[in-house]
Image: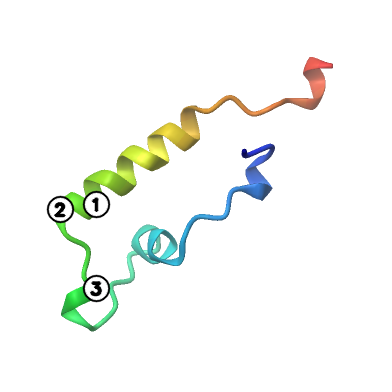
Amino acid sequence: MVTSVGDFKPPRRYVDLVNGCVCPDPSCRPTIFMVTRIINEWIVALKTPLPQNDEL
């Protein structure tokens, strides 16, 4: 369960994709399906309400 933004550590391939890095090996080049799934997972993660300190 993610408790804060700092605790959210996406897998390495997510970081590479966000940074615009594509590894030279064609087999690990992101496919449209992988990209779609990653985007969907990011949307879910970003939509997940995080506890705010000012809500105490």
- Percent x, y for residue 52? 73, 25
The residue under label 3 is which amino acid type? Cys
Q: Which mark is residue 32?
A: 2
Q: Residue at x 16, y 59 (%)?
A: 31
| Residue 21 left/right relative to 27 | right
Task: Point out the image quarter for the N terminus.
Answer: top right
What type is the residue that disc 1 sits on? Answer: Val
Residue bearing mark 1: 35
Determine contact: label 1, label 3, CB under 8 Å.
no
**Cα distance between the residues tagged 2 and 3:** 12 Å
Residue 12 percent across, percent down from the top left: 45, 66
For disc 3, the marked residue is 28
Q: Are marks 2 and 1 in contact (CB under 8 Å)?
A: yes
Q: Which quadrant of the figure contains the C terminus?
A: top right
Residue at 80%, 26% in the rendered image: 53
Q: CA distance from mark 1 to mark 3?
A: 12 Å
**Callout 2: helix, strand or loop?**
helix
Q: Is disc 1 surrounded by few (<14), some (14 to 19) or many (20+) residues within 10 Å?
A: few
Kindly identify the residue that appears in the image at 53 percent across and 28 percent down.
Answer: 48
**Outermost top residue:** 55
Task: Find residue 3 and name its label.
Answer: none
Q: Given the current orientation, which residue lies at the most extreme bottom position? A: 24
Q: Earlier in the sequence, mark 1 or mark 3?
A: 3
Q: Label 2 neighbourhood size at 10 Å, few (<14), some (14-19), many (20+)?
A: few
**Looking at the rendering, which quadrant does residue 30 occupy?**
bottom left
